[in-house]
Each structure stands twice: as structure tokens, then as C-alpha cells.
Amino acid sequence: MKRLIFMASAAVALSSASANGQSTCDAAAFSEADADGNGWVDQSEFAAFVMPNCGLDFGEANTLFAVSDKDMNGVLDAAEFWRAIQKLFV
Ligand SMILES: [Ca+2]
Ligand SMILES: [Ca+2]
């Protein structure tokens, strides 16, 4: 686990707080992660959001997606997305 790296990137994300208009690794960014706006974040949308914003690699993004999709319907709803991002902060 790259827990220290997660924490460091989270701290950077929180301190920069989208002042420059870029997305940050934030559980409140569900609407940004839901690129097509259909109300769910699918696996490719999730990877596209967390890889640049949360510092995950592709494998980590897919693992986090899999463990966060609690009802295993292949997409994350807002609550599942929230829990996924929270995992990076604890
Ligand atoms: Ca979507
Ligand atoms: Ca789900």
C-alpha cells in the first residue's frame, strides 16, 4: 500500500482546493468524475478521475473501484464514490 503517498497527495489536493479550476481528489467531485453526466461513475470514468487527481496507477484505480462497488452493478453511485475516495484519506 502506498498509504503515505495517498496521504501526501490528499494533503496537496486539499490545500490547493480547486483554486486553479482543476479537479482535486475530493469525494465531493462526483459530478466531475461522472464525465458523461449519467449519474453513475463507471470504471473508465473512475480511473480517468483518480489517476491524475489522486495519484493512483491503473491497477490501483481498478482495485479501488472493485472494492467500492458494493452492489456490484458495475458503476459507482454517489455514496459508493464517496466511500471510495474516503478510503484514500484514512
Ligand atoms: Ca457516467
Ligand atoms: Ca454500484
Image (tube, rainbow, N blue to C red):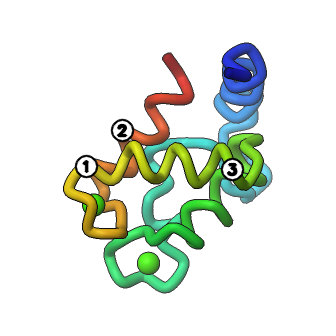
**Ligand 2 quadrant in view:** bottom left
Q: Position of residue 7 (x, y in %)?
A: 68, 19
Q: Position of residue 70 (x, y in %)?
A: 25, 49
Residue 70 numbered mark, or none = 1
Residue 59 numbered mark, or none = 3
Which tag is nearer the camera, tag 1 or tag 2? 1
Amino acid type, label 1:
Lys
Amino acid type, label 3:
Gly
Residue 58 location, quadrant: bottom right
Left or right: 24, with 42 as reference point: right
Residue 83 numbered mark, or none = 2
Q: CA gap, disc 2 to disc 3?
A: 18 Å
Label 1 secondary element: loop
The disc, 1 or 3, on the residue closer to the chain's N-terminal end is 3
Q: Quadrant of the N terminus?
A: top right
Residues at discs 2 and 3 in contact (Cβ within 8 Å): no
Amino acid type, label 2:
Arg
Give the residue drawn at x 35%, y 72%: 40
Residues at discs 1 and 2 in contact (Cβ within 8 Å): yes
- 56 up-or-down from 44: above or below: above
Around disc 1, counting alpha carbons within 10 Å, would you say few (fewer than 14), some (14 to 19), or many (20 or more)?
Answer: some
Q: Position of residue 80 (x, y in %)?
A: 31, 49
Residue 82 numbered mark, or none = none
